[in-house]
Image: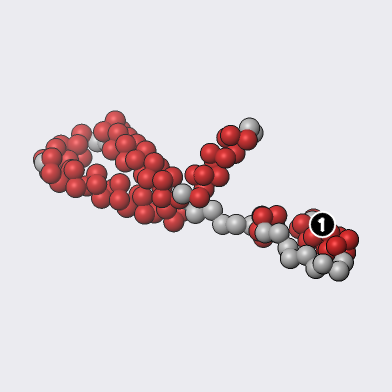
């Protein structure tokens, strides 16, 4: 993967609400479309009888509920290995060679 694509992906991971809102918009477009295409005619007649205001409120509720649920589901949990890679360990000044070995060992701790 190119570095620019990795940066964009990491930016999206840092902004979970943006990803949730985009996903909720897709969900809001997909579900009513699938219902209109594959739903039984009686259900569609009932939806038309509800009126524009209630259908709009239903779509808004679907969007808001989907955004909240997707915000919870799309939250990426950090792995312990990633935390070790990103947080530099405090190096003691008297033994830099020993500290380098400890850092290298800690970075490969998941391989044991």
Q: Residue at x 74, y 65 (%)?
A: 90
Disc tally is 1
Q: How is the image coloured?
A: secondary structure
Q: Quadrant of the C terminus?
A: bottom right
Can residue 105 be seen here? The reply is no
- Kindly give the residue lying farthest to the front in the view shown: 93
> Which residue is depicted at the point 36% across and 50% down?
67
Measuring from the top left, give residue 42's x and y in whole percent.
18, 38
Residue at 13% x, 40% y: name it: 52
Question: Image quadrant of residue 5?
Answer: top right
Which residue shows up at 70% across the image and 55% down it?
A: 85
Please state the horizontal and vertical placement of residue 14, each as a whole percent of the image: 50, 50
Residue hosting label 1: 104
Q: Decide which of 14, 58 is in the foreground and name it.
A: 14
The residue nearer to you, when weighing 74 against 42, is 74
Q: Position of residue 63 (x, y in %)?
A: 30, 46
Quadrant in which residue 56 is drawn: top left
Tell me: residue 7, above or below residue 88. Answer: above
In the displayed structure image, the side of residue 76 where residue 99 appears, left or right: right
Q: Quadrant of the N terminus?
A: top right
> Compared to 75, does 3 lie above or below?
above
Q: Indicate the secondary structure of the residue bearing disc 1.
A: helix
Q: In the rendered image, is residue 28 in sight?
A: yes
Left or right, 6 with respect to 74, comes to right
49 to the left or right of 37: left
């Amino acid at each position: 993967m190119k570095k620019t694509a990795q940066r964009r992906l990491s930016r999206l991971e840092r902004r979970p609400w943006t990803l949730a809102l985009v996903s909720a918009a897709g969900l809001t477009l997909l579900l009513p479309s699938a219902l209109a295409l594959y739903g039984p005619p009686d259900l569609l007649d009932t939806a038309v009888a509800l009126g524009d205001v209630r259908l709009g409120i239903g779509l808004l509720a679907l969007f808001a509920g989907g955004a909240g649920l997707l915000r919870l589901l799309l939250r990426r949990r950090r792995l312990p290995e990633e935390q070790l890679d990103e947080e530099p360990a405090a190096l003691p000044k008297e033994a830099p060679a020993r500290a380098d070995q400890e850092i290298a060992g800690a970075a490969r701790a998941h391989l044991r």
